[in-house]
Amino acid sequence: MAGGTTIETLGDHLDHGHFISAHCRDRACYHSAELSLEHLIERLGRDHSALAAHLVPHLRCGKCGGKGVSLTVSATGRYSGWKAR
């Protein structure tokens, strides 16, 4: 993409004001929460890939402990229906 911005890392998302939310896929849970990019950067580094394939192995549901997690990235702001845990 000519002249566009490439956003590939956790640091890129933080710098651009993006939000990443995790969603438990367990049918008995379905918990969702906004992830703390600052905390992820502290643990994984600013240059860690923000691709789901690279983040999901580091995540667990904060409610049920399940590892079946999907991610949503929002570049425009927080979705009011999601609550941080």
Image: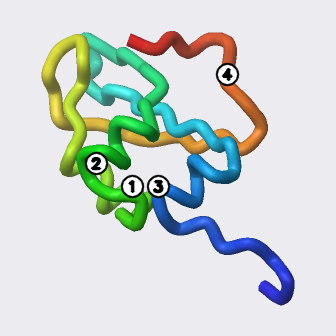
Location of the C terminus (image quadrant): top left
Q: Are marks 2 and 1 in contact (CB under 8 Å)?
A: yes
Q: Residue at x 48, y 63 (%)?
A: 9
Q: Where does label 4 land, which residue?
A: 79
Residue type for callout 1? Ala
- Residue 81's tag is none
Q: Nearer the viewer, mark 3 or mark 2?
A: 3
Q: CA distance from mark 4 to mark 2?
A: 20 Å
Binning the other alpha carbons within 10 Å of mark 1 as few (below 14), some (14 to 19) or many (20 upward) gives some
Q: Where does label 2 land, which residue?
A: 56
The residue nearer to you, when weighing 59 against 38, is 38
Residue type for callout 4? Tyr
Q: CA distance from mark 3 to mark 2?
A: 13 Å
Q: Secondary structure at mark 4?
A: loop
Taking 8 as reference, is 2 left or right? right
Q: Where does label 1 land, which residue?
A: 52
Q: Residue at x 35, y 36 (%)?
A: 39
Q: Position of residue 37 (x, y in %)?
A: 45, 40
Q: CA distance from mark 2 to mark 1?
A: 6 Å
Q: Are marks 4 and 1 in contact (CB under 8 Å)?
A: no
Dot 1 or dot 3: first in sequence order is 3
Q: Position of residue 49 (x, y in %)?
A: 39, 65
Dot 3 or dot 2: first in sequence order is 3
Q: CA distance from mark 4 to mark 1?
A: 19 Å
Q: Where does label 3 land, which residue?
A: 10
Binning the other alpha carbons within 10 Å of mark 2 as few (below 14), some (14 to 19) or many (20 upward) gives some
Binning the other alpha carbons within 10 Å of mark 4 as few (below 14), some (14 to 19) or many (20 upward) gives few
Q: Secondary structure at mark 3?
A: helix
Q: Secondary structure at mark 2?
A: helix
Q: Are marks 4 and 3 in contact (CB under 8 Å)?
A: no
